[in-house]
Amino acid sequence: MIKVAAFDIGKVLLDFDYGIFVRRMAPRTQMDVPALDAFLNQSPLLAQYESGRLTSSEFFTVVQKETGFDGTEAEFAAYFEDIFTPIDEIITLQATLAARGLPTYTLSNTNEMAVRHISRAYDFWPRFTGHILSHEVKALKPDPKIYEVFEEITGCLGNEIVYLDDRSENIVAGKNRNWNAIEHRNGADTREALICLGVLP
């Protein structure tokens, strides 16, 4: 029997585009858009931030030093946060599960600046029972540690868990723990999968 649901955030609850951030920030740095994009998205820097090895201030300091960004940390955070678009169908689906009494948690590779923005900007955030976030756990999916923390916090194991994620490597990690792991591609298929598992009517 399924006792809890886990939701990835990016590309499941919220679409995101780091390109928005890069294009807005580039004119205030010494880099053009391709160079800045490569620095932020193809280097280990973002992973270090999302795994909690860098604080927000440390992340900003490194970015400012390497790119020559001429703004404040608050301006940088505003750029960094303004990249999200809600995926209404899945947000509604989570609300339905919560209303039916199923505990729901986020389980996401994310960072402090993003979470600070999301928790203020979107009313779905407090509907979740709790949040297991990579920068707090200090482990990135598909590292087993973040899945273990989820199990410890929820008290659930194996097929008691249904898990939505858009990345196949994360889904494989869930399936390796016998979770009911659904690779999210579109709202209709995800809804159908949850109906088949009996968590939606």
Image (cartoon, rainbow, N blue to C red):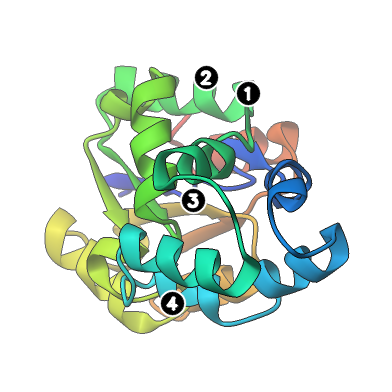
The quadrant where residue 161 appears: bottom left
Q: Name the amino acid type tagged 3.
A: Asp
Q: Name the amino acid type tagged 1.
A: Glu
The percent position of residue 106, horizontal first and vertical second, equals 37, 46
Residue at the spot of label 3: 8
Between 20 and 98, the residue placed more toward the observer is 20
The quadrant where residue 166 appears: bottom right
The answer to whether residue 62 is seen in the rendering is yes
Counting residues from the start of the chain, the first of labels 3 and 1 encountered is 3
The answer to whether 75 is drawn above or below residue 201 in the figure is below
Would residue 172 be found to the left or right of residue 42 on screen?
Answer: left
Between 12 and 174, the residue placed more toward the observer is 12
The answer to whether 162 is drawn above or below residue 92 in the figure is below
Question: For the residues marked 3 and 2, what is the alpha-carbon distance in whole angstroms?
Answer: 15 Å
Q: Is mark 3 in CB contact (under 8 Å) with mark 1?
A: no
Counting residues from the start of the chain, the first of labels 4 and 2 encountered is 4
The percent position of residue 157, horizontal first and vertical second, equals 25, 66
Between marks 4 and 3 in the image, the one whose residue lies nearer the viewer: 4
Question: For the residues marked 4 and 2, what is the alpha-carbon distance in whole angstroms?
Answer: 32 Å
> Which of the labelled discs sits on residue 92, or is there none?
2
